[in-house]
Amino acid sequence: MKKILLILSIALCAFSAQAKINVVATLPDLGSLARDIGGDNVSVTVLAKSTEDPHFVDARPSFVVALRSADVLIDGGAELELGWLPPLLQNARNAKLDIGKPARVQASQGVRLMNVPANVTRAAGDVHALGNPHFGVDPIIAKAIAQHIAQSFSAIDPTNAAAYDANYKKFEAAINAKLQQWGAALLPFKGQHLAAYHDSWPYFGHRFGLEIDIFLEPKPGIPPSPSHLAEVIAQMKAQKIKAIIVEPYHDRKIAERVASATGATVVDFAQYPGALPSTDTYIKLIDALVSRLAAALK
Amino acid sequence: MWEVMFWPIVACVLLPWLLVYLGLHVVQRGIIFVDIAMAQMASLGICVALLFRLDLHGWTTFAIALGFTLLGGAIFSLTGKRASKIPQEAIIGIAYVVAAAAAVLLLSRAAEGDEEIKQMLVGNILLVTPAEVWKCFALFVAVGIFHFVLRKNFLLVSFDRDGAYQQGLRVRWWDFFFYASFGLVVTIFVRMAGVFLVFSYLIVPAVCGINLARGTRTRLLLGCIVATIGGIGGLFWSFYGDLPSGAAIVCMFGGVLILVSMTSLLRRKRAN
């Protein structure tokens, strides 16, 4: 049986001009970048759903199957997938995907992470010892990740290196053009303070000159204490904060409660393409985020 | 298929027998939720270890978790009086919520979020490693031998409490031994396979066995058959339907239980 399959697959390879490289991306934003760079030369499997909390993802058998036959693995790194990716990799036993190999793209490599704690102490309450891992929403960092992906694809599949490079250049140009537009849309609100349910937006805020620095839930999975919420409400009133950013897997009720107490609006945000309507690519997602935020702050 | 599902299948073949046996005790004693309460005590122990910044995978953490489980066992054996107005399930329920809430309080003071803790506490049968399966099997064999050697007293205490008192058995101590060994088994299995699975493996095969047969030995045998069918069936279903494995096994158990109840119903009708 195996032999027949082997012969069949060889025949298939000979017929189709080239076999596609199997790319597994842990998160939908990385998947979107991989599709932009790989084009028709790659087939991309994304593990987490776009509405799923990247800290907690439920493993399914197909994840192990996909990782086992993956030629390239793209993950966020910086401990974002710490809770679920290591056991999957351990079971997939695909040595090609070890950290440091060309087939493993860790998006966090080369990214200067924000909010790196000087020392992890209980008092600070920091979740991520390596720094904040939600960097994908900064378009300039996304360019760097895309370049990293293009380099990896070229190393794995040198015959198509020129195509990957061209796709990267196209992506870079698209982001550069859009950056002007996005910057202009958010320029009127420069320096404004915003609230967010979870601290997922320091990179986005940094890029567009917004201070997203009040958080409803200081730690993922731990409900905010009443005194913390009272403090947040007082702070928001004092600073006249207009918007609270919430992601699909957050407790919207708490945000609505705070919003009604402060007169702010709840803005539905998402880190991953596909989680908001008609945001199937990375650029469309940032488009949606910018226009939603501009509408809420007006 | 085999490369991915081999170790989960091995786990589902090698491990359930002890859970089925302990489940017969648990159902007989009417303390259905004791496993979840015990598992929650263990996770409270891990949260304490986290607060003291111990290595979560080290033996000290395991010792603390086990200590909390034993504490739970001590509480349950002390409260399990011969005649009491308060049912044991009430104590078990209270132990569960207080341990769960205490864990939330502790975590709100810990430096890390709960990703890693969740991973530590709630395993996934799909992702078992060979080392885990063998370690768990060895422990189960040890506990199994302990229970086999002392089966007379354990069975008497669970199935005929009045008889046990009349024979002058120190019921409280036997209860403690039972809860302690049970807590050890549950803690290990939850870390490997999750809370859902431990609960289903304890209760569903036991209920099926009690439904279909009389003697403990026959019930155990039937329970093991149900556990093996449900486990392996659930794993296949999870693979071909690409579903989370633990939940697929649990739902498969639900289906098997419905089948078994219908069969026993039909049999009873025919007997009438």
Image: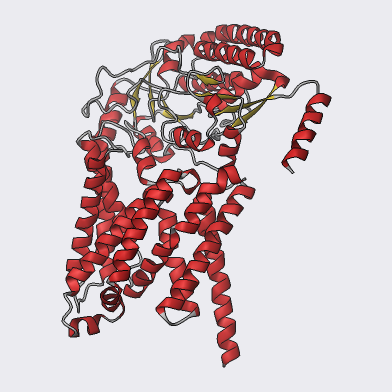
Q: Is residue A24 visible?
A: yes
Q: Is residue A226 visible?
A: no
Q: Is residue B138 above or below residue A216?
A: below
Nearer the observer, A283 or A114? A114
Image quadrant occupied by the C terminus of chain B: bottom right
Residue B78 in which image quadrant: bottom left
State the image coordinates of residue A119 (x, y, percent, origin top left). Answer: 24, 20
The residue most toward the right is A15
Q: Is residue B88 above or below residue A13?
A: below
State the image coordinates of residue A55 (x, y, percent, origin top left). Answer: 43, 33
Q: Is residue B105 above or below residue A270?
A: below
Q: Residue at x 28, y 73 (%)?
A: B154
Nearer the observer, A283 or A109? A109
| Residue B171 horizontal side relative to residue B146, left or right | left
| Residue B36 horizontal side relative to residue B214, left or right | left
Q: Residue at x 58, y 84 (%)?
A: B267
The residue most toward the bottom is B272
Nearer the observer, B179 or B89? B179
